[in-house]
Image (cartoon, rainbow, N blue to C red):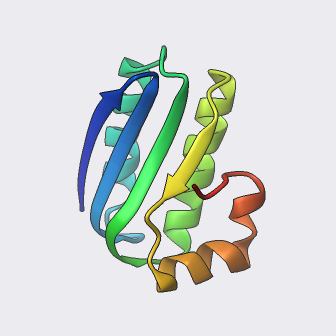
Amino acid sequence: MKITARRAGGSLYIYLSGELDEYNAAAVRREADRLLDENVAAERAVFDLSEVRFMDSAAIGFLIGRYKKLKRYSTPMFVQGTNAAADKVLSVSGIYSLIPKI
Protein backbone atom coordinates (compact mmCIF):
# COMPACT_ATOMS: atom_id res chain seq x y z
CA MET A 1 0.00 0.00 0.00
CA LYS A 2 1.29 3.40 -1.00
CA ILE A 3 0.01 6.61 0.54
CA THR A 4 0.70 10.13 -0.74
CA ALA A 5 -0.80 13.52 -0.07
CA ARG A 6 -1.06 16.99 -1.51
CA ARG A 7 -2.65 20.25 -0.45
CA ALA A 8 -4.82 22.19 -2.88
CA GLY A 9 -6.35 25.33 -1.51
CA GLY A 10 -7.83 24.45 1.84
CA SER A 11 -8.15 20.75 1.04
CA LEU A 12 -5.82 17.92 1.98
CA TYR A 13 -5.97 15.07 -0.53
CA ILE A 14 -4.71 11.69 0.64
CA TYR A 15 -4.20 9.14 -2.13
CA LEU A 16 -4.20 5.43 -1.33
CA SER A 17 -2.85 2.91 -3.81
CA GLY A 18 -2.75 -0.88 -3.51
CA GLU A 19 -4.55 -3.15 -1.07
CA LEU A 20 -6.01 -1.88 2.19
CA ASP A 21 -6.45 -4.91 4.40
CA GLU A 22 -5.61 -6.26 7.86
CA TYR A 23 -2.02 -6.93 6.78
CA ASN A 24 -1.09 -3.31 6.10
CA ALA A 25 -3.79 -1.29 7.90
CA ALA A 26 -1.58 -0.37 10.88
CA ALA A 27 1.19 1.09 8.71
CA VAL A 28 -1.31 3.01 6.56
CA ARG A 29 -3.02 4.28 9.72
CA ARG A 30 0.26 5.62 11.12
CA GLU A 31 1.16 7.38 7.87
CA ALA A 32 -2.32 8.85 7.40
CA ASP A 33 -2.34 10.11 10.99
CA ARG A 34 1.06 11.74 10.47
CA LEU A 35 -0.23 13.50 7.36
CA LEU A 36 -3.38 14.65 9.16
CA ASP A 37 -1.38 15.92 12.14
CA GLU A 38 0.92 17.88 9.81
CA ASN A 39 -2.06 19.48 8.08
CA VAL A 40 -4.41 20.39 10.93
CA ALA A 41 -5.19 23.71 9.24
CA ALA A 42 -6.81 21.95 6.27
CA GLU A 43 -10.45 22.89 5.79
CA ARG A 44 -11.33 19.37 4.67
CA ALA A 45 -9.69 15.99 4.05
CA VAL A 46 -10.42 13.93 0.95
CA PHE A 47 -9.33 10.30 0.80
CA ASP A 48 -8.91 9.24 -2.82
CA LEU A 49 -9.46 5.49 -3.27
CA SER A 50 -9.21 5.36 -7.07
CA GLU A 51 -6.03 3.26 -6.95
CA VAL A 52 -7.19 0.87 -4.19
CA ARG A 53 -7.37 -2.59 -5.76
CA PHE A 54 -8.76 -4.43 -2.73
CA MET A 55 -10.24 -3.51 0.62
CA ASP A 56 -11.73 -5.53 3.45
CA SER A 57 -13.29 -4.71 6.81
CA ALA A 58 -9.96 -3.29 8.02
CA ALA A 59 -10.44 -0.50 5.47
CA ILE A 60 -13.74 0.42 7.09
CA GLY A 61 -12.03 0.57 10.48
CA PHE A 62 -9.26 2.68 8.96
CA LEU A 63 -11.71 5.18 7.48
CA ILE A 64 -13.83 5.42 10.63
CA GLY A 65 -10.71 5.94 12.74
CA ARG A 66 -9.58 8.81 10.48
CA TYR A 67 -13.10 10.24 10.59
CA LYS A 68 -12.99 10.31 14.40
CA LYS A 69 -9.55 11.91 14.38
CA LEU A 70 -10.66 14.59 11.92
CA LYS A 71 -13.84 15.20 13.90
CA ARG A 72 -11.67 16.17 16.88
CA TYR A 73 -10.03 18.75 14.58
CA SER A 74 -13.49 19.86 13.32
CA THR A 75 -12.38 18.93 9.81
CA PRO A 76 -14.90 17.30 7.47
CA MET A 77 -13.83 14.12 5.68
CA PHE A 78 -14.81 12.83 2.25
CA VAL A 79 -13.95 9.89 0.00
CA GLN A 80 -13.65 9.93 -3.76
CA GLY A 81 -12.67 7.64 -6.60
CA THR A 82 -14.19 4.44 -5.29
CA ASN A 83 -14.38 1.59 -7.78
CA ALA A 84 -17.48 -0.62 -7.95
CA ALA A 85 -16.19 -3.18 -5.43
CA ALA A 86 -15.06 -0.55 -2.90
CA ASP A 87 -18.28 1.38 -3.36
CA LYS A 88 -20.29 -1.75 -2.56
CA VAL A 89 -18.27 -2.45 0.62
CA LEU A 90 -18.63 1.16 1.78
CA SER A 91 -22.33 1.36 0.90
CA VAL A 92 -23.21 -1.87 2.70
CA SER A 93 -21.26 -0.74 5.77
CA GLY A 94 -23.22 2.51 5.94
CA ILE A 95 -20.03 4.54 6.03
CA TYR A 96 -21.38 7.10 3.56
CA SER A 97 -23.72 8.36 6.29
CA LEU A 98 -20.59 9.55 8.14
CA ILE A 99 -18.16 10.14 5.31
CA PRO A 100 -19.80 11.45 2.13
CA LYS A 101 -18.61 10.41 -1.29
CA ILE A 102 -17.79 13.27 -3.64
Total marks drawn? 0
Tell me the residue at 28%/34% (across/down).
6
Give the quadrant of residue 4. top left
Tell me the residue at 45%/30% (across/down).
11
Position of residue 36 measured from the top left corner of the image (x, y, whole percent)? 43, 29
Position of residue 50 measured from the top left corner of the image (x, y, whole percent)? 36, 66
In the image, is residue 52 above or below residue 5? below
Q: Is residue 63 left or right of residue 68?
A: left
Q: In this view, does 50 lie to the left or right of 85?
A: left
Quadrant placement of the N terminus: bottom left
Q: Is residue 9 left or right of residue 63?
A: left
In the image, is residue 74 above or below residue 54? above
In the image, is residue 38 above or below residue 97? above
Q: Is residue 29 left or right of residue 51?
A: right
Say which of 25 and 13 sits in front: 13
Tell me the residue at 70%/61% (across/down).
96
Say which of 9 and 6 sits in front: 9
Position of residue 71 measured from the top left corner of the image (x, y, whole percent)? 68, 31
Quadrant placement of the C terminus: bottom right
Tell me the residue at 50%/77% (across/down).
86
Position of residue 101 measured from the top left corner of the image (x, y, whole percent)? 61, 58
In this view, the residue farthest toward the top is 41
